[in-house]
Amino acid sequence: MLARLLPWIAGTAMAAALVLTGVAMIQTLRLKDLRPQGIRAQATVMIVDLRAPDREQPWASGSVRLFVSDDEAGTFATNVPHPPASLTELWPGALVDVAVLPGDQPQVAFWPVLPERRQRAVWIALAFALALAAGSGLASRFLKDR
């Protein structure tokens, strides 16, 4: 019974690995477009000022006060518009990854932390699917010889 199931498990795991490979490639290409230019630094969120959605504007908006202290980027505090929720998580006191373009008025852009986590999870799932396919393929070969 187990010898009959193992080739099916190997095939299913290989199909899942092919799908996950495609998803990982698409995520990698999209992530490259989301990454902002500049020096990557960590900023401390001081204040999050969000406006709740209402009838006039059906989306949340607001600003975030950040404190950046980095060797390359310098030390400064700045207000930036609230980023999309798909990029990063914000709360007062949080450490947030940002990209800083130095200058008289440094420009700050949020680093895509949540898409990077999703991509990492897909790569881990891909490795697991490939390991399952290899393990069940080897086991089915060993059981066939008996």
Image (tube, rainbow, N blue to C red):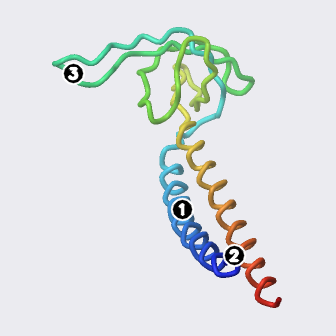
Q: Nearer the viewer, mark 3 or mark 2?
A: 2
The numbered dot on residue 2 is 2
Tell me residue 112's x, y (percent): 53, 38
Q: CA distance from mark 3 to mark 1?
A: 35 Å
Q: Which residue is mark 1?
A: 25
Q: Earlier in the sequence, mark 1 or mark 2?
A: 2
What number of labels is visible? 3
Are there few (<14), some (14-19), or many (20+) residues within 10 Å of tag 2?
few
Q: Position of residue 45 (x, y in %)?
A: 57, 15
- Residue under label 3, please give it: 57
Mark 3 and mark 2 in contact? Answer it, CB < 8 Å: no
- Residue under the image location 55 percent in, 40 percent down: 37
Residue at disc 2, secondary structure? helix
Is residue 85 depicted above or below 62 in this figure? below
In the picture, residue 81 is in which quadrant?
A: top left
Which residue is pictured at 55% across the width and 55% down the height? 28
Between residue 126 and residue 113, name the one nearer to us: 126
Relative depth, front residue between 126 and 38: 126
Where, quadrant-wise, is the C terminus in this rendering?
Answer: bottom right
**Discs 1, 2 touching: Cβ within 8 Å:** no
Relative to 69, residue 6 above or below: below
**Earlier-in-chain disc, 3 versus 2:** 2
Up/down of 77 relative to 84, above or below: above
Point out the frontmost of discs 1 and 2. 2
Q: Amino acid at mark 2?
A: Leu
Amino acid type, residue under disc 3 in the picture: Gln
